[in-house]
Image (cartoon, rainbow, N blue to C red):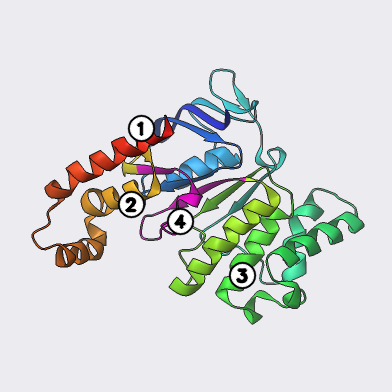
């Protein structure tokens, strides 16, 4: 049963259509990844789900609760949606230490000091920052700053976690570690993840545990929702020439290989995967 539901969602900025007639169904507890180049509508979609942008057409609902509707003229502000969001930039306050950075959204909600301290320390513990509670952002690494953003997001006990290319500013080794840490956090807290990636960074680590992946091939248009392995191959071979190093590797490994040679194999693999689910 669908938990996060986007129905015929459209968003325009002047004459530019950022998202056009988008329909997505995401199950509760799923990690749903959006894969596509910059400017294709990933961030706009995440911002509409979060409530930072209102839609022009369509409806968004979570758990049967209506969040935005153009027909019903309804819009629920972001502070009432109980979603966590982690941005591409670290988005930490330089004048606050780690503890106060994580506690800030709880203070805004007017919770008691006891509850704020309890939730903040729990989030800090689960993100491995317990040794840095009193440290300031200029005293810690980039990976630790990103952990602050994750801790701040999970401290509010979100039902949905929105991740907008949160790993792109990290080095490859740390990026790989953070992927698995995010997945571990999802298992512990049970939230649904919607993850945006530009394709250069695979959000699912080549692993089906990250769930279905949405492919975008043109600005504002959903191309397909497929298994991670299929879509990564299809993206590499046909949709994004910028990432041609992987293609060159395949050509060296299989001499004479061309995209037209691999398409039938991909189609066959897709049919087999579809049949296995029936």
Q: Which residues are magenta?
A: 192-215
Question: Does residue 171 appear in the picture of this structure?
Answer: no
Query: Where 131 sits versus 125, above or below?
Result: below
Residue 232 image label: 2
Question: Residue 13: where, in percent of width, then height?
Answer: 42, 38
> Distance between the Cα atoms at labels 2 and 3?
29 Å
Residue situated in front as seen by the camera: 252 or 93: 252
Task: Select label 2 or label 3 by which is in front.
Answer: 2
- In this figure, what is the number of numbered marks? 4
In whole angstroms, how far apart are the C-alphas of marks 1 and 3? 44 Å
Q: Which mark is residue 203?
A: 4
- Disc 3, SS: helix
Give the crowd class for mark 3: few <14, some 14-19, many >=20 residues within 10 Å.
many
Report, in whole angstroms, how far the alpha carbon at label 3 lies from the one at label 4.
19 Å
Q: Quadrant of residue 257?
A: bottom left
Q: Tell me where residue 171 appears, x and y as whole percent.
A: 46, 73
Q: Identify the image quadrant of the N terminus.
A: top right
């Amino acid at each position: 049963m669908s938990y996060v539901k986007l129905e015929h969602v459209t968003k325009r900025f002047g004459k530019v259509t950022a998202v056009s007639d988008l329909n997505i169904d995401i199950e509760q507890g799923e990690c749903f990844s959006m894969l596509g180049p910059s400017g294709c509508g990933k961030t706009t979609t995440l911002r509409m789900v979060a409530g930072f942008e209102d839609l022009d057409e369509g409806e968004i609902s979570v758990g049967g609760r209506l969040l935005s509707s153009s027909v019903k003229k309804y819009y629920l502000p972001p502070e009432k949606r109980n979603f966590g969001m982690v941005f591409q930039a670290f988005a930490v306050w330089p004048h606050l230490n780690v503890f106060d950075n994580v506690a800030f959204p709880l203070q805004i909600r007017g919770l008691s000091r006891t509850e704020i301290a309890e939730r903040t320390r729990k989030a800090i513990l689960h993100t491995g920052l317990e040794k840095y509670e009193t440290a300031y952002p200029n005293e810690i690494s980039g990976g630790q700053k990103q952990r602050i953003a994750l801790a701040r997001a999970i401290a509010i006990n979100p039902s949905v976690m929105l991740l907008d290319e949160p790993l792109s500013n990290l080095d490859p080794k740390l990026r790989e570690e953070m992927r698995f840490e995010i997945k571990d956090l999802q298992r512990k807290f049970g939230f649904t993840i919607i993850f945006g990636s530009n394709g250069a960074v695979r959000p699912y680590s080549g692993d089906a545990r990250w769930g279905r992946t949405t492919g975008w091939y043109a600005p504002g248009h959903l191309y397909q929702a497929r298994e991670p392995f299929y879509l990564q191959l299809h993206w590499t071979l046909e949709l994004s020439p910028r990432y041609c190093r992987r293609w060159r590797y395949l050509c060296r490994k299989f001499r004479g290989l061309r995209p037209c040679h691999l398409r039938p194999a991909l189609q066959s693999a897709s049919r087999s995967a579809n049949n296995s689910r029936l």
